[in-house]
Image (cartoon, rainbow, N blue to C red):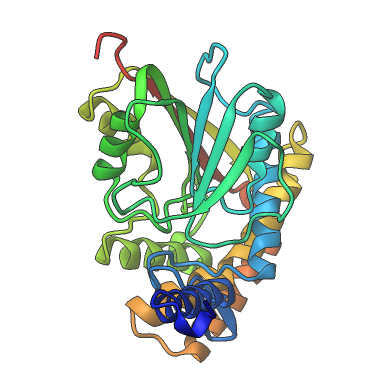
C-alpha cells in the first residue's frame, strides 16, 4: 500500500510538520531590542538566550567555581544515582556533576536549547519549564535536585520547592546557589544618592518585585525549604568581590566584575522596557552610566552575595 493509501499517513505527516514547526520556533527564539530570547513559554525568563548571553553564563559558571573553590555542592551526598539540574543553562554544572559521579544519571532541564550537542553518556538535557508541573520524571526518584542562578525565571518559589520535595527520594537533597542582584559595600563614605549603579539596582529590585519574579530572593530560601518540609537545612553566604580590591581573591574579583559588566545591559533591556515601560534609549543611557561606574569602583570595594542553601527530605517520608 502506498503512503497515499494509508489513512494514517495524512495524520502522521501533519504531526511531523507541526512538530518540525514547533521545534524550529523553539530553536530560533524570538528577537527583541536586538537580542534573542527563548521561545518556549515566551516571556517566562527575563534575560536573553543568544550566544553573547551564553558566553556570560559560562563566565558566571566560572565565577561559581572560583567562589566555591572547585566544589560542585555542599550537600553530603553518598553515591548518588539520579540527579536533576533545574535551569541548567549551558549545562556546565550538569556535565561537571556527571563527570564527578559517573555512576549517576544526570538530567538537566531548561527553557532554552542552548546546551552542547555532545554530552557525557550519563547526562541528558530536556527542554522544560520548571514552573510547570514536572511530567518528565517520576516522583520520589532523585537523590539530589540542584539549581543555580535561576532567579530571573522562577514564578513561584514555594511551588518549585514543593515539586522538588515530591521528586526527591527519602533522604535526598535539594541545593540552591543564588546570587543577589544587589551589590554591597562596607565603606561608609559610599554616596548612594549620587550612584547611578545604586539607582539601577533599586529599579531592578522594584521591577522584578512588581511582576512576581523578585531577583533578590536568595536569603529567604532557607526558611522556604523548611516550610516545604525539608530538614537539616543550612545556608552559607559568600561575599564575592566585584573587581580586584580584595587581594586574596583577585581572580574571582576579575571574573565577577566582567560578569557584572556583561549583565547590566541585558538586565535593563527586558526588565525596564517590558515592566517599567522605558524606551530603549533611556535604558541604554542608564546602562552606560552604570557600566562606567563599576569600571571605576575599586575604592568603593563593592561585592555581591552568593547564597548556598541546601536541605534534606526526611528519611522516613
In the rendered view, tell whether residue 1 sits above or below residue 158: below
For residue 98, what is the image quadrant? top right
- Look at 64% across and 21% down and name the residue there: 103
Relative to the observer, which residue lies in front, 165 or 45? 165
- Look at 53% across and 62% down and name the residue there: 112
Q: Is residue 204 left or right of residue 243?
A: left
Question: How many marks overall?
Answer: 0
Q: Quadrant of the C terminus?
A: top left
Relative to the observer, which residue lies in front, 62 or 14? 14
On the question of residue 296 being in view, the answer is no
For residue 27, what is the image quadrant? bottom right
Q: Is residue 108 left or right of residue 134?
A: right
In the rendered view, tell whether residue 43 sits above or below residue 70: below
In the rendered view, tell whether residue 125 sits above or below residue 93: below
For residue 165, what is the image quadrant? top left
Q: Is residue 249 left or right of residue 230?
A: right
**Residue 206, percent from left and from top:** 31, 65
Amino acid at each position: 500500500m502506498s503512503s497515499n493509501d494509508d489513512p494514517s499517513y495524512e495524520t502522521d505527516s501533519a504531526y511531523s510538520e507541526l512538530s518540525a514547526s514547533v521545534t524550529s520556533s523553539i530553536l530560533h527564539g524570538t528577537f527583541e531590542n536586538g537580542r534573542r530570547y527563548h521561545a518556549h513559554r515566551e516571556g517566562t525568563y527575563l534575560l536573553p538566550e543568544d550566544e553573547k548571553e551564553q558566553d556570560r553564563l559560562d563566565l558566571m559558571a566560572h565565577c561559581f567555581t572560583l567562589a566555591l573553590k572547585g566544589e560542585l555542592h555542599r550537600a553530603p551526598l553518598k553515591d548518588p544515582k539520579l540527579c536533576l539540574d533545574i535551569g541548567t543553562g549551558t549545562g556546565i554544572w550538569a556535565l561537571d556533576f556527571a563527570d564527578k559521579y559517573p555512576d549517576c544519571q544526570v538530567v538537566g532541564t531548561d527553557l532554552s536549547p542552548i546546551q552542547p550537542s555532545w554530552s557525557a553518556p550519563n547526562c541528558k538535557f530536556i527542554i522544560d519549564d520548571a514552573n510547570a508541573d514536572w511530567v518528565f520524571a517520576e516522583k520520589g526518584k532523585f537523590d539530589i535536585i540542584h539549581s543555580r542562578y535561576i532567579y530571573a525565571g522562577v514564578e513561584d518559589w514555594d511551588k518549585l520547592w514543593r515539586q522538588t520535595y515530591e521528586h526527591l527520594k527519602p533522604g535526598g537533597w535539594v541545593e540552591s546557589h543564588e546570587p543577589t542582584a544587589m551589590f554591597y559595600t562596607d565603606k561608609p563614605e559610599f554616596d548612594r544618592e549620587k550612584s547611578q549603579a545604586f539607582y539601577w539596582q533599586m529599579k531592578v529590585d522594584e521591577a522584578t518585585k512588581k511582576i512576581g519574579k523578585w531577583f533578590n530572593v536568595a536569603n529567604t530560601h532557607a526558611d522556604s525549604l523548611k516550610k516545604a518540609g525539608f530538614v537539616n537545612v543550612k545556608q552559607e553566604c559568600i561575599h564575592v568581590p566585584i573587581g580586584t580590591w580584595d587581594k586574596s581573591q583577585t581572580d574571582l574579583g576579575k571574573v565577577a566584575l566582567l560578569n557584572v559588566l556583561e549583565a547590566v545591559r541585558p538586565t535593563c533591556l527586558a526588565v525596564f522596557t517590558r515592566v517599567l515601560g522605558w524606551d530603549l534609549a533611556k535604558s541604554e543611557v542608564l546602562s552606560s552610566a552604570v557600566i562606567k561606574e563599576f569600571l571605576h569602583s575599586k575604592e568603593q570595594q563593592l561585592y555581591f552575595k552568593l547564597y548556598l542553601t541546601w536541605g534534606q527530605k526526611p528519611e522516613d517520608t
